[in-house]
Image (tube, helix red, strand yellow):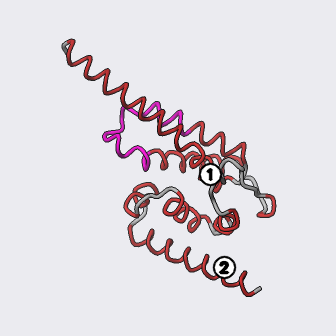
């Protein structure tokens, strides 16, 4: 590799690192919110986010297309969150859950609490679709699920949310 090729490679790496750092800075609240929706605990969510950032940064050179950073990173974060959940094996009751003020900025807390009450399979697709703005195709990649399964879970989640909101309105 000549001097010119080395400089191009170094510049690409520096640009990737800058892009990665700006992504982490911009979406840190979203990452925390997603991890907390799985772990239901601030400390565990912070641990999962930290581990995901570290793993993503270490594996950044393996990412083929930097434009795929968001779904790739979310997959790492989900894996870390679920792994931590399994390791901790905590039981958290819904009335013990609370939302961090920082993560809930500009969000409807009542709706967030209802979404958090959904079963894992419905909660995860709902958060990825509505809160993280991932496309159905990206959600399929992140969760390693077929498109039909993702669409079905999202549809069922919408129906469950609608029913809960109707029941609350009449109660």
The dot on residue 165 is: 2
Residue at 40 percent of width and 43 percent of height: 69
Horizontal side of 55 relative to 148 (left or right) equals right
Horizontal side of 131 relative to 108 (left or right) equals left
Front in this rendered view, residue 122 or 3: 3
- Placement of 7 over or under 48, stated as above or below: above
Q: What SS does tag 1 mark? A: helix
The dot on residue 33 is: 1
- Placement of 114 over or under 40, stated as above or below: below
**Range drawn in magenta:** 52-72
Residue at 61 percent of width and 64 percent of height: 120
Question: Does the magenta-highlighted stretch encompass residue 68?
Answer: yes
Question: Does the magenta-highlighted stretch encompass residue 132?
Answer: no
Residue 113, position as x, y percentages in the image: 70, 65
Query: Which secondary structure is most common in the magenta stretch?
Result: helix
The answer to which quarter of the image holds residue 11 is top left
- Dot placed on the residue nearer the N-terminal end, 1 or 2: 1
Horizontal side of 133 relative to 9 (left or right) equals right
Residue 153, position as x, y percentages in the image: 50, 72
């Amino acid at each position: 590799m000549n001097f010119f090729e080395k400089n191009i490679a170094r510049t690409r790496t520096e640009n990737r690192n800058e892009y990665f750092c700006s992504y982490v800075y911009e979406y840190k609240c979203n990452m925390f919110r997603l991890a907390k929706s799985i772990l239901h605990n601030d400390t565990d969510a912070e641990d999962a986010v930290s581990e995901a950032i570290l793993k993503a940064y270490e594996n950044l050179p393996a990412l083929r297309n930097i434009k795929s950073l968001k779904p790739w990173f979310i997959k790492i974060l989900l894996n870390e969150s679920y792994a931590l959940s399994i390791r901790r094996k905590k039981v958290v009751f819904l009335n013990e859950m609370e939302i961090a003020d920082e993560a809930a900025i500009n969000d409807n807390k009542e709706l967030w609490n209802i979404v958090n009450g959904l079963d894992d399979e419905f909660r995860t697709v709902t958060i990825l679709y509505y809160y993280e703005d991932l496309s159905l195709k990206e959600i399929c990649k992140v969760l390693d699920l077929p498109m039909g399964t993702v669409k079905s879970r999202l549809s069922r989640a919408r129906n469950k949310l609608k029913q809960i909101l109707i029941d609350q309105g009449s109660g």
